[in-house]
Image: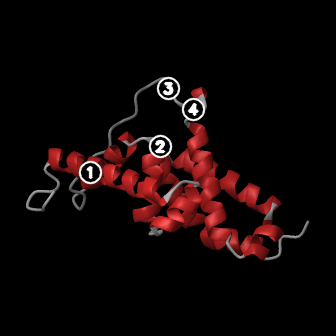
Amino acid sequence: MTDTGFREYAAARRAALRRTAYLLCGDWHLADDLVQDALAGLFVRWRKVRAGGEVDPYVRRMLVNGYLATHRRGWRREVAVAELPETAVAGPADDGTRDVLLRALSELHPSQRAVVVLRYWDDLSVEQTAAVLGCSTGNVKSQAARGLAHLRTALARTGALEGETV
C-alpha cells in the first residue's frame, strides 16, 4: 500500500483535527485517540478518498462518528482516579470565559455539540454540516439554534456577557 500524499495531509491537518476533536469531546487524550482513529481509517482508504477529492469532509465525518460512538460505549463515561485533579487557576489574561464556555459546551447533547463545533468552529456551512452528520439541513439549523441558546444562557448566568445582547 502506498502513502503518496497521506503523510503530508496528516502532518498538515493533524493540529486542526485535534482542536476540532477536543471541542467535540472536551478531553485532549480522547481527542488524540479520535484523530488517530480517523487518520488510521483514512490511510486504509486513502487512494479512494483522495481520488474523490473530498478528504476534509470525509475525515470530519470520521471524527464526529468516532466521538458519537464514545457516548454509546458505557466504559468511556466513567474514569476512576485515585485523587481528584487540582483545579486550574485562571491566569491574568483569562477572565474565565473560556472555561465557562467549555463547561457549557460539555453540557450540550453530543449531536448538538457536534453541530455547534462544525458550524462555528470549523466554519462549515449548514449544508456541509448536514453532509458530515448525515442529517437534514433543518436538523442542523434547529440543533445549532438550541445549542447557541444554551451557550448564551450559560454565559449570561456567569456574567460573561455583561453589556452584550443575549
The label number, if any, that marks residue 118 in the structure image? none
Q: Residue at x 56, y 43 (%)?
A: 68
Q: Does residue 10 appear left or right of residue 141 in this picture?
A: right
- Pointer 1: residues within 10 angstroms few (<14), some, or many (20+)? few
Q: Does residue 75 appear left or right of residue 38 in this picture?
A: left
- Pointer 4: residues within 10 angstroms few (<14), some, or many (20+)? few
Which residue position is annotated with label 1?
149
Which residue position is annotated with label 3?
81
Give how far apart the Cα atoms at labels 3 and 1 are: 34 Å
Give how far apart the Cα atoms at labels 1 and 4 are: 28 Å
Viewer-closest of 143 and 114? 143
Q: Earlier in the sequence, mark 3 or mark 1?
A: 3
Report helix, strand or loop for mark 3. Answer: loop
Q: Amino acid at mark 4?
A: Arg
Check whether the beta carbons of the residues at disc 3 and disc 2 lie within 8 A of each other: no
Viewer-closest of 35 and 149? 149
**1 or 4: mark nearer the eye:** 1
Q: Amino acid at mark 1?
A: Ala
Mark yes or no: residue 71 visible: yes
Give how far apart the Cα atoms at labels 4 and 3 are: 14 Å
Q: Residue at x 35, y 49 (%)?
A: 102
Which residue position is annotated with label 2?
110
Residue 31 image offset from top left, x and y in percent: 56, 50
Residue 135 image offset from top left, x and y in percent: 54, 54
